[in-house]
């Protein structure tokens, strides 16, 4: 501890999942702050540019409790952005998948134990957790991913109520946009459709296009985590939606992507088609989602600032410039049904 007249030590902020899509954006913003910044991920994390932060970049298997405890040792705050990538390469996970359970639930519990027992004296550490938005008034999870996220939320908020740490849950809608890592568009539906449109593939949906989703740009998402960090004491012990607060019709979004991609590639816009859903499609694919972030905004002053069309222009331009020689294969269930698709 600093003595009288001595400057206080810089707070240690640890970002778990620092090389990921949201993690890299959070690290990029934290670089400008006078903190000790520990960026931890499974694969090497490249942090470019100068900043005020004292940087410590580490690689670790965070599913190993010993490695996890070492990664967060001494942290004043931890931003938990680790997610499970399924065998199909996207965010979905299924019941009975031990890897999904380990990454989405057990890791959080191990993290709570490490932070709650590894600090003597002083204020409890802050843990900010990235979760997922649920429909308003309906806390019932619709799939394994949502069930696992809710289990982690409950463990974190219980630990916060017990005074072991200051737990803050940020529930996010669909995050999109070109991130700070060149060529990284994320793994959501917007990224998938940009890749298809640039590759000349039809854009397919399993409904009439009127389903609405809240779309939050990755830079605005990173800003939300820093706002949560700045207001952790006021936010602790609750979950908070962080989104734009309104929905965009998927049909309109897909048609905009097709039009922008056509201009960048010099080809006619690819068609937007309605196709039959595959076996196993869940209810989450057919529901509108909005994040009511009014409470979070009132406490933090945070506001999303990105204009959707501008962000789509940027993302399509970045992707078309870097992958003009590549193609994206259409999934089998779409190849089988495109010939019967209805143009929207």
Image (cartoon, rainbow, N blue to C red):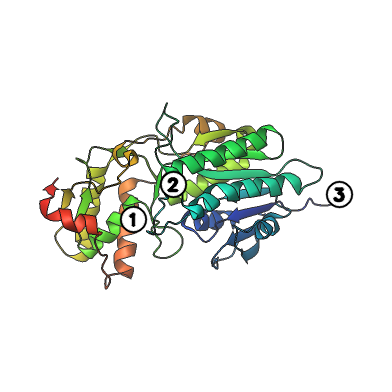
Whether the residues at callouts 2 and 3 have beta carbons within 8 Å, the answer is no
Q: Quadrant of the C terminus?
A: top left
Of labels 1 and 3, the one closer to you: 1
First in sequence: mark 1 vs mark 3: 3
Q: Are there few (<14), some (14-19), or many (20+) residues within 10 Å of tag 2? A: few
Q: Name the residue under label 3.
A: 5
Q: As drawn, which residue projects farthest toward the top? A: 137
- In the image shown, does 332 or 160 lie closer to the viewer? 332
* Closer mark to the observer between disc 2 and disc 1: 2
Circle 2 is placed at which residue position? Answer: 95
Using the image as rendered, state which of residue 209 and residue 49 is in the foreground.
Answer: 209
Residue 270: tell me if it is visible: no
Note whether 332 is above or below 229 in the view shown.
below
Callout 3: SS: loop
Quarter of the figure with residue 263: bottom left
Q: Which of marks 2 and 3 is in front?
A: 2
Residue 242, percent from left and from top: 47, 38
Among the two numbered marks 2 and 3 on one chain, the one whose residue lies closer to the N terminus: 3
Residue 124 in view (yes/no): yes
Residue visible at 47% across and 30% down in the picture:
294
The Cα atoms of the two marked residues, 2 and 3, are separated by 56 Å
Q: Earlier in the sequence, mark 2 or mark 1?
A: 2
Q: Local crowd at mark 1 within 10 Å, few (<14), some, or many (≥20)?
A: many
**Residue at the spot x=56%, y=44% of the render?**
129
Task: Count the labels in the image.
Answer: 3
Q: Residue furthest bottom?
A: 325
Residue 224 percent location from the top left of the image: 51, 43
Residue matched to label 1: 191
């Amino acid at each position: 501890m600093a003595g009288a007249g001595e400057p206080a030590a810089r707070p240690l902020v640890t970002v778990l999942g620092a090389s990921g899509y949201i993690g890299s954006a959070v690290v990029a913003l934290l670089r400008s702050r006078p903190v000790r910044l520990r960026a931890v991920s499974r694969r090497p994390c490249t942090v470019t540019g100068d900043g005020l932060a004292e940087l410590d970049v580490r690689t670790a298997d965070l599913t190993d409790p010993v490695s996890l405890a070492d990664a967060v040792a001494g942290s004043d705050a931890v931003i938990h952005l680790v997610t499970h990538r399924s065998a199909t390469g996207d965010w979905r996970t299924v019941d009975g998948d031990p890897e999904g359970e380990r990454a989405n639930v057990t890791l959080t519990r191990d993290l709570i134990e490490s932070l709650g027992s590894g600090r003597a004296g002083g204020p409890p550490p802050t843990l900010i957790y990235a979760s997922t938005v649920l429909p308003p008034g309906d806390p019932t999870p619709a799939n394994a991913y949502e069930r696992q996220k809710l289990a982690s939320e409950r463990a974190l908020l219980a630990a916060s109520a017990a005074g072991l740490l200051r737990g803050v849950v940020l529930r996010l809608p669909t995050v999109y946009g070109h991130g700070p890592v060149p060529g990284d568009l994320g793994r959501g539906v917007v990224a998938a459709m940009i890749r298809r449109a640039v590759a000349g593939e039809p854009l397919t949906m399993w409904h009439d296009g009127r389903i609405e989703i809240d779309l939050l740009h990755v830079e605005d998402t990173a800003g939300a985590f820093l706002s949560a960090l700045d207001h952790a004491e006021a936010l602790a012990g609750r979950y908070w939606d962080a989104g734009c607060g309104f929905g965009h019709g998927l049909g309109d979004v897909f048609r905009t992507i097709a039009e922008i991609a056509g201009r960048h590639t010099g080809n006619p816009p690819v068609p937007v088609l309605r196709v039959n859903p595959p076996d196993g499609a869940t209810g989450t694919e057919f529901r509108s989602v909005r994040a009511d972030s009014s409470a979070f905004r009132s406490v933090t002053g945070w506001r999303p600032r990105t204009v959707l069309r501008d962000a789509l222009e940027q993302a399509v331009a970045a992707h078309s410039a870097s992958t003009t020689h590549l193609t994206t294969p259409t999934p089998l269930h779409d190849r089988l049904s495109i010939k019967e698709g209805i143009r929207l």
